[in-house]
Image: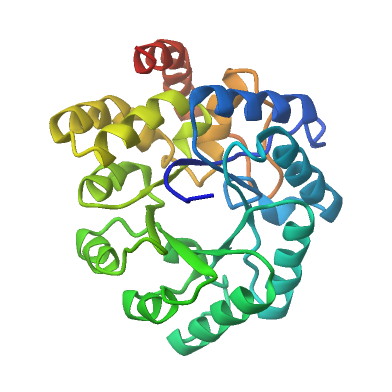
């Protein structure tokens, strides 16, 4: 399955006692399918992967594959700080039915560019899944540079990059690597329209957890080159782009999801949305239905 268009980085709903909320998870999967998303990520950073037990990870992935498999790509977050552990988790994701591995640059350890190159080659050759590179230096402490991506993009099992650096110079450099076998995906909701208008293949989004139809419309307009319409729709979504960044992801988007009936809270060390932002969250959640209806016209 091709990696393009709108892909949602799914949040993981929890019950009030911190257990997985499997009912809310199933409803979230159905809402994404009905909203027209073109792929999902299970157990990425938005899914609080670092807090999931092994059996929880397996359960979430298997249920997503059962509901969405064959209809769209199901990417599994498998990036860890060590290469051997990343390979092992990628193999487990493959056994659970994932179609691709979303592999973040190894967090905390700050490898060199050559270390990153060798890490990704090892995962691509030994993990058993097509690899989507994921660069988010604000979280990992290292930056997968375009020149290193250029050395990886020709590998037959490295099929895309999710780039969360929204800088136009960075996007331009990566777009030079774009081809039929290597997709460029924005990992930043706020700059995604500009990236897609410039030629990027899609967006891995946080905001689409609550607005799958609206973000699908944004992606369709931008990828189709309809600049004026895409920019107008992007302006309409700007409050959601901004709100999802008022505190660490996924705190804000889970506050919206909770207001819409999908789960309760987060797991430590993340805390619920701070009180000064509650009124804003209430306002945005109240507007979700109208925006989704507008996007379906």
Percent coordinates x, y for residue 182 in the rendering:
40, 64
Vertical placement of residue 120 versus 212, above or below: below
Vertical placement of residue 90 versus 237, above or below: below
| Residue 134 in sight here | no
| Residue drawn at the location 64% of the way across and 30% of the way down | 29
| Residue drawn at the location 42% of the way across and 20% of the way down | 284
Percent coordinates x, y for residue 280 in the rendering:
42, 22
184 sits left or right of 234 in the view: right
Vertical placement of residue 138 versus 87, above or below: above
Q: Give whichever of 55, 154 is nearer the camera.
A: 154
**Outermost residue toward the right?**
55
Percent coordinates x, y for residue 123 in the rendering:
62, 75
| Residue drawn at the location 13% of the way across and 30% of the way down | 228
Vertical placement of residue 223 versus 199, above or below: above
107 sits left or right of 84 in the view: left
**Outermost residue toward the left?**
228
| Residue 234 in sight here | yes
Number of marks in the image? 0
Please tell me in which quadrant of the rendered image residue 104 appears. bottom right
Q: Quadrant of the C terminus?
A: top left
Percent coordinates x, y for residue 272 in the rendering:
61, 35
170 sits left or right of 119 in the view: left
150 sits left or right of 108 in the view: left
**What colouring does the structure picture have?**
rainbow
């Amino acid at each position: 399955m091709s990696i393009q268009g709108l892909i949602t980085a799914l949040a993981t709903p929890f019950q009030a006692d911190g257990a997985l909320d499997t009912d809310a998870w199933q409803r979230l999967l159905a809402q994404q399918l009905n909203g027209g998303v073109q792929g999902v990520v299970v157990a990425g950073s938005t899914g609080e992967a670092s807090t999931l037990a092994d059996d929880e990870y397996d359960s979430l992935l298997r249920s997503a594959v059962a509901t969405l498999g064959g209809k769209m790509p199901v990417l599994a977050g498998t990036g860890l700080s060590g290469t051997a552990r990343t390979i092992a988790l990628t193999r487990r994701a493959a056994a659970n039915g994932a179609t691709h591995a979303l592999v973040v640059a190894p967090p905390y350890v700050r490898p060199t560019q050559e270390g990153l190159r060798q890490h990704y080659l090892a995962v691509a050759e030994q993990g058993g899944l097509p690899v989507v590179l994921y660069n988010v230096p604000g979280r990992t402490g290292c930056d997968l540079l375009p020149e290193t991506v250029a050395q990886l993009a020709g590998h037959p099992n490295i099929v895309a990059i999710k780039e969360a650096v929204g800088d136009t110079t960075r996007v331009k450099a990566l777009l030079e690597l774009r081809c039929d076998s290597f997709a460029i995906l924005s990992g930043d909701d706020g700059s995604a329209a500009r990236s897609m208008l410039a030629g990027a293949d899609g967006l891995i989004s946080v905001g689409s957890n609550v607005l799958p139809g609206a973000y699908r419309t944004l992606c369709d307009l931008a990828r189709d080159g309809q600049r004026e319409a895409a920019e107008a729709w992007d302006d309409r979504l700007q409050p959601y782009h901004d709100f999802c960044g008022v505190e660490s992801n996924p705190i804000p988007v889970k506050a919206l999801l909770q207001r819409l009936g999908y789960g309760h809270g987060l797991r430590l060390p993340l805390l619920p949305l701070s009180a000064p932002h509650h009124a804003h969250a209430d306002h945005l959640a109240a507007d979700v239905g109208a925006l989704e209806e507008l996007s379906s016209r």
